Image (cartoon, grey):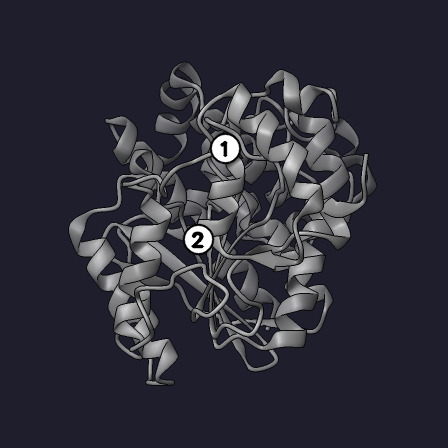
Amino acid sequence: MSDWVMTGFVGYGRLEADLWLLGMEEHCLDDADAATRLQLLPSFPLTIGVDEAHRRYGFHELPRGVAVWDVASELARVCDLNTSSIGELDGDVLLAELLPFPRPTNDAWLPAHAALFADYDCYTRALLAPRAARYVRLIIEHAPRVVVVHGARYHSDVEAAVLALGGARVARLFALANKPARVLEIGRSQIVLVHNFGRSAAWSTDAKATLSTFIAALWREETLDGRETTSPAVSIETLLVGMFHHRMGNVLPKEVAAALPGFALDASKASLVMVVQREDFRRWATTRWSALGGRTAIEACVARDLADLLSEAKRYTRLHKRYGGTSADEIRAAVETAHARIATWESNGAS
C-alpha cells in the first residue's frame, strides 16, 4: 500500500497547535464512507481543516454530536483557546488518530480495509508501533503544551514510544471521578492518557468536568497535588493476582510462564498472592519476551482484557471475576482502574 500512513496525513488542524487530541482511529458511517475516505486520504497534505476534509468526503456540513469534537471544544474553552476553529488550519487544537483507517465500530473490518490488510491483527501489527513512534516524534518536534491520548486500548503502545524516545512517566495515578488518568512527559509536552470519549465509554458528568479542570491545571502548569486517586479498597496484589490467574497457556506461552517459579496453570489465587509479592515477579512481569512479540507479560494480559471487553460473554465470565463490577459500565470502569493502578505499580518499580 501507499506509504501515506507513515509519511502523509497527520490530522485535522495545524501541527503548531498547543493542544492535541490523539484518538485510536476515526469514526465513519459505513463501508461506502470508509472506502471514500481511504481513497482520498493519500492525497491529503500533512494537515487539513476538518471542514474542508469533510466536504471532500461528501458531507454538506460537519456531522453533529461527535463526542471527541465536543470534548475538544470544552478543553479549548478551559484553556482559553479559540473554540470556533477546532481542527482547523487557523485553530489552536489538532485532532489526530493513532491508526489511519476510519471504521464505523471497534469490531468492523470492512471490504475497504480488507483490500489493504487481511484482518485487524495484521493491520495493527504492521502499523501500531511505527505510527505511535511517528506521533511521538511529531510531539517532540512541535512541542504542543498538552496532548490528550484518548483510548485505553493503545495506551501501552504510546507509552512505549514515549519512553523509547526519551520521555518519562509521572509516577502518580489521577482520579477523574469514575475515570483514571496517567501523565507522561517528553520535552516541553505533557501527555495525558485517558479513556475514549465515545458514548459506550460511560464518562460521567463529574468525570468530564474533572477532566476539564485537570487539563486546565496542566495547561497553566499548576500543581496536581490532591488530584491523585484515593487509597483503594482493593490491594495492588489482589489486582495483579486477578490479572495473572489462569493466564498460563491461553495468554502467556508456557516458556514465559515457566520462567517464573510457582506460576502454573492450576495455581490457586492464594498461592499467587505470595508469588506477586516477590521481587522476581516484578522483573518477570516487566521483561520483554520474544515469545510475546517483544511485549511484557503485563502488556499481553492488558491486550487480552481489552479484547475481552468487546465480548459480552467474556466480559462477564472473565473480567467480572478478575476485577469486579456488575453492569457492563461497572466492569469496564473496574478494568480501566485496575490497568491504571498496575501501570503506576510498574512506574514506581522503575523509578
| Total numbered badges shown on the rendered structure | 2
Disc 2 designates what residue? 340
Is 188 situated above or below 351? below
The quarter of the picture where residue 65 lies is top left
Is 323 situated above or below 132? above
Residue 200 bears which disc, if any? none
Give residue 260's position: percent from left, percent from top: 70, 41
Relative horizontal placement of residue 263, taking residue 170 as reference (left or right): right
Foreground of the two, 194 or 287: 194
Upstream in sequence: badge 2 or badge 1: 1
Relative horizontal placement of residue 230, taking residue 122 as reference (left or right): left
**Residue found 52% across the figure and 28% down from its top:** 307
Quadrant where the C terminus is found in the figure: bottom right
Residue 212 can be seen in this image: yes
Amino acid on which the number 1 mark rests in the picture: Asp
Q: CA distance from mark 2 to mark 1?
A: 13 Å
Give residue 324's position: percent from left, percent from top: 31, 33
The quarter of the picture where residue 326 lies is top left
Give residue 24's position: percent from left, percent from top: 52, 44
Is 243 situated above or below 296? above
Foreground of the two, 263 or 192: 192
Q: Secondary structure at mark 1?
A: helix
Residue 228 can be seen in this image: no
Amino acid on which the number 2 mark rests in the picture: Ala
**Residue found 33% across the figure and 40% down from its top:** 334
Disc 1 designates what residue? 305
Quadrant where the N terminus is found in the figure: top right
Q: Secondary structure at mark 2?
A: helix
Give residue 48's position: percent from left, percent from top: 56, 56
